Amino acid sequence: MSTLKNLFLLVMILSPVLSIAQQSGIEAALQKGNATELATFFSKSVDLLIPGTEDTFAATEAATVLSEFFTKQTVKGYKQNHVSTPQEGRAKYTIGDLYTAQGNYRVTLYYDAQQKISEIRIQK
C-alpha cells in the first residue's frame, strides 16, 4: 500500500514539473519561429487562425502553414503574458506577443484535455 501512495505522490509532484517543461518548450519554439518544434505539442488536428488562413489542419499540415507564416514574418521573439488555470468545462489557454520584422502579433493557444495545442490564433 505504501508503494502505491509513493507512486501517487511522485505523480502529483512531477505533474506540474512536466507542464512547466512543456510550456518552456512551446515558448522556445515560438521565440525561434520554429513550427516543427512547436508541432511536437500539437493535438492530432489543429484549428489555425492566422492572417490569411482560417481552417482545421492535421498536425503536420498545420506545422507547414505555420512555418510559411513564420518565414514571411521573420520572427524576432515571443513573450508569454498569461497562462490560464484549467477549470471544469474550460480548457487551458495561453496568451503572448509574437515579435516579428513586420510588426507584433497577439498569440492565443488553446489546449485540449491532454494538454496538447488544439487551436492557434495569431492576430495583429
Image (tube, grey):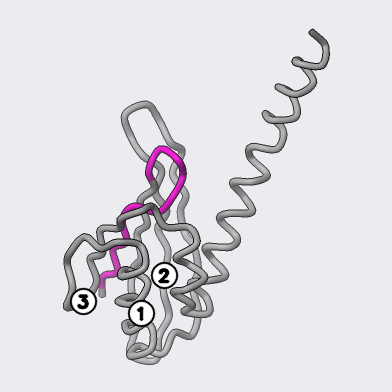
Q: Helix or strand or loop: what does disc 2 sit on?
A: strand
Q: For numbered disc 3, what is the local secondary structure? A: loop
Apparent side of residue 38 relative to residue 9 in the rendered image (left or right): left
Q: Which residue is mark 2?
A: 97
- Given the image, on which type of amino acid does mark 3 rest? Pro
- Residue at 38% x, 80% y is 67
Q: Residues within 10 Å of mark 3 (few under 14, many from 20)?
A: few
Instruction: Write down the region rendered in magenta.
Output: 112-123
122 vs 11: above or below? below
- Quadrant for residue 10, please give it: top right
Find out whether residue 94 is within the magenta segment. Answer: no
Mark 3 lies on residue: 51
Specify which label sits upstream in the sequence, 1 or 2.
2
**For mark 2, does the 10 Å Cα neighbourhood hold few (<14), some (14 to 19), or many (20 or more) residues?**
many
Q: Residue at x 52, y 75 (%)?
A: 31
Are discs 1 and 2 less than 8 Å apart at CB? yes
Q: Secondary structure at mark 1?
A: strand
> In percent of the image, x 75 and y 24: which residue is there?
7
Label 1 neighbourhood size at 10 Å, few (<14), some (14-19), many (20+)? some
Q: Which residue was labeled with disc 1? A: 104
Label 2 or label 3, whichever lies nearer to me, is 3
